[in-house]
Image (cartoon, rainbow, N blue to C red):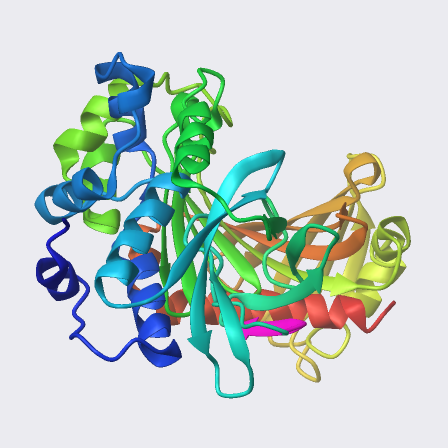
């Protein structure tokens, strides 16, 4: 038995009639307040010798969460959410699926009426997806992006239509009914020593219009069109992760001690960055070529600045432009100097801008990349200092990302 009322209190929800509205509330609060995290999985793997006893059952999962704020990874989350829904009167069915390989993923089919159709609603808290998938849907909108839904020969495939094009972007949940024995068997297989969730520390929470995660030594904040990356010093990480994800510091410290800092994605970057993304129909090399020359860069800044002077730099293909406010080129106090270094092999322009009388320096880049057969324009800004304030100031982060998005729109109009 799980302490249902205590769990509801931790989710800040009251009991209600089983239905799609209550299901959506439970799904949203679960993903926001119960972190996707593998610290508990790392500790469980190291501390429990018996393979059959390694999985954290719902009773263990919820007791740990109420005591320490922990959560779990895919199978543990699905089992825990299933136990909660069942205790609240929902009819549920576990399903296996695929992210990278068959049966490496799991989700839930919940019997509920959506108002437009009846049938099973897919509740994927294991990935997790940012929205429920109603029966018969072919598109599902969420704050983090639109999802496409399609039937396959063995189940339902879900893929991101837009959103930040990083990490896994698609999954499949199979129709086949799954016995508790089979579910437990596949769960145990996730404790193989090579699993990414046993070799690096990672965490995630979905909060309204953004997803906050930790991997590779850095905190990331993703919204529909941008990603903020903030590196954490190893010594500071446990305290900061406790604050961000609500997991007791002692659990994070113990798990981090078991995973080398250089594991997984490598050492964290040296500074904070903010990247905006825009999908376009042009080929990456064509998009890059439009802005990689002085003439192309001039066209890019038209309308927001006038070019006062231009000269080549010592870097191959590099150039420097002096820019002034449109119609006020004599206003020397508001001039800016852009030093641009093209990198054709990476289809990237690196830009240094000195602005105003103080000659304040900012660094950024423009690049065109192919992701999953699609072309994306990327505008990345290097931020001075740690900029952990942007983890709390969502408005400021949004304004900075909005400015980068406008730059991308100007680029896209040239294609």
Q: Residue 187 in the image: x percent, y percent?
A: 42, 32
Q: Is residue 352 left or right of residue 413?
A: left
Residue displayed at 25% across by 37% down: 57
Residue 241, by quadrant, is top left
Residue 216, by quadrant, is top left
Q: Residue 413 in the image: x percent, y percent?
A: 81, 73
Q: Residue 77 in the image: x percent, y percent?
A: 34, 46
Magenta: predominant secondary structure element? Answer: strand
Q: Residue 242 in the image: x percent, y percent?
A: 19, 43
Count all numbered tags in the image, as a single digit.
0
Q: Is residue 186 above or below residue 115?
A: above
Q: Is residue 131 magenta?
A: no
Q: Is residue 386 something one can see in this rendering?
A: no
Q: Is residue 140 magenta?
A: yes
Query: Which segment is the magenta one?
Result: 137-142
Q: Quadrant of the C terminus?
A: bottom right
């Amino acid at each position: 038995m799980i302490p249902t009322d205590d769990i509801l209190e931790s989710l800040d929800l009251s009991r209600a009639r089983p239905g799609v509205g209550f299901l959506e509330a439970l799904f949203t609060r679960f993903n926001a307040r119960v972190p996707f995290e593998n610290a508990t999985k790392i500790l469980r793997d190291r501390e429990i010798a018996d393979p059959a006893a390694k999985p954290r059952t719902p009773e263990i999962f919820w007791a740990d969460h109420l005591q320490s704020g922990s959560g779990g990874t895919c199978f543990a989350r699905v089992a825990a959410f299933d136990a909660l829904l069942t205790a609240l009167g929902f009819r549920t069915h576990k399903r296996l699926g695929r992210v990278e390989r068959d049966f490496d993923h799991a989700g839930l089919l919940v019997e509920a009426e959506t108002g437009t159709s009846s049938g099973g609603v897919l509740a994927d808290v294991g990935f997790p997806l940012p929205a429920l998938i109603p029966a018969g849907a072919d598109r599902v909108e969420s704050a983090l992006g639109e999802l496409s839904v399609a039937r396959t020969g063995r189940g339902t495939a879900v893929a991101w239509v837009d959103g930040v094009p990083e990490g896994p972007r698609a999954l499949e949940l199979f129709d086949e009914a799954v016995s508790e024995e089979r579910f437990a068997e596949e769960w145990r297989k996730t404790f193989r020593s090579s699993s990414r969730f046993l070799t690096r520390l990672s965490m995630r929470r979905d909060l309204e219009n953004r997803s906050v995660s930790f991997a590779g030594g850095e905190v990331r904040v993703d919204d529909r069109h941008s990603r903020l990356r903030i590196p954490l010093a190893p010594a500071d990480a446990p305290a900061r992760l406790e604050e961000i994800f609500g997991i007791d510091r002692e659990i994070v410290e113990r798990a981090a001690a078991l995973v080398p800092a250089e594991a997984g994605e490598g050492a964290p970057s040296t500074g904070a960055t903010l990247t905006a993304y825009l999908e376009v129909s042009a080929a990456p090399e064509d998009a890059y070529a439009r802005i990689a020359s002085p003439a192309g860069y001039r066209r890019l800044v038209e309308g927001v600045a006038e070019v006062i002077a231009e000269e080549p730099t010592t870097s191959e293909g590099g150039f420097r432009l002096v820019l002034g406010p449109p119609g006020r080129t004599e206003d020397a106090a508001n001039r800016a100097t852009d030093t641009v270094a093209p990198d054709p092999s990476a289809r990237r322009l690196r830009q240094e801008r000195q602005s105003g009388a103080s000659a304040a320096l900012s660094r950024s880049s423009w690049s065109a990349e192919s992701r999953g057969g699609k072309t994306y324009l990327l505008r990345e800004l290097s931020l001075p200092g740690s900029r952990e304030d942007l983890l709390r100031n969502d408005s400021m982060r949004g304004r900075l990302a909005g400015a980068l998005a406008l730059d991308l729109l100007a680029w896209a109009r040239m294609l």
